[in-house]
Image (spheres, rainbow, N blue to C red):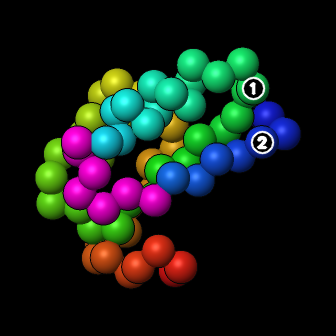
Amino acid sequence: MNKTTLVIPNYNGLAYIENCLKSVFSSDTPADVIVVDNGSTDSSCELVEEKFPSVTLVKLGVNTGFCH
């Protein structure tokens, strides 16, 4: 378990999520990473699952908004 946990909200972020996670994992600071998906209809969740298996992906069925 790392001392830092990074939570990344996602909603149809296919164009951004891969570069975002690559940037996070290129850091020298170890961190647990959680992506919270707000009911995306693009394939951003599949990308996270396939390319970043160490990421915890929380899939919400609907877009509950950023603060939820």
Q: Position of residue 34 (x, y in %)?
A: 55, 48
Instruction: Look at 75% across and 26% down and name the residue there.
Output: 29
The residue pinned by badge 1 equals 29
Question: Total of numbered circles in the picture?
Answer: 2
Quadrant in which residue 32 is drawn: top right
Quadrant in which residue 20 is drawn: top left
Q: Is residue 54 visible?
A: no
Q: Is residue 65 above or below residue 25?
A: below
Tag 1 secondary structure = loop
Quadrant in which residue 10 is drawn: bottom left
Q: Is residue 27 visible?
A: yes
Q: Is residue 50 above or below residue 38?
A: above
User: In screen coordinates, is 42 left or right of 66?
Assistant: left
Q: Position of residue 25 (x, y in %)?
A: 56, 24
Q: Position of residue 36 (x, y in %)?
A: 46, 58
Q: Is residue 26 above or below residue 12?
A: above
Q: In this picture, which residue range is highlighted in magenta?
A: 9-15
Instruction: Look at 23% across and 44% down and name the residue there.
Output: 14
Q: Do tag 2 and tag 1 residues touch (Cβ < 8 Å)?
A: yes
Instruction: Look at 53% across and 79% down and name the residue there.
Output: 67
Distance in Å between CA atoms under marks 2 and 1: 8 Å
Dot 2 alpha-carbon crowd within 10 angstroms: few under 14, some 14 to 19, many 20 or more: few
Amino acid type at circle 2 is Thr
Residue 49: in magenta span = no
Q: Camera-side residue: 42 or 61?
A: 42
The residue pinned by badge 2 equals 4
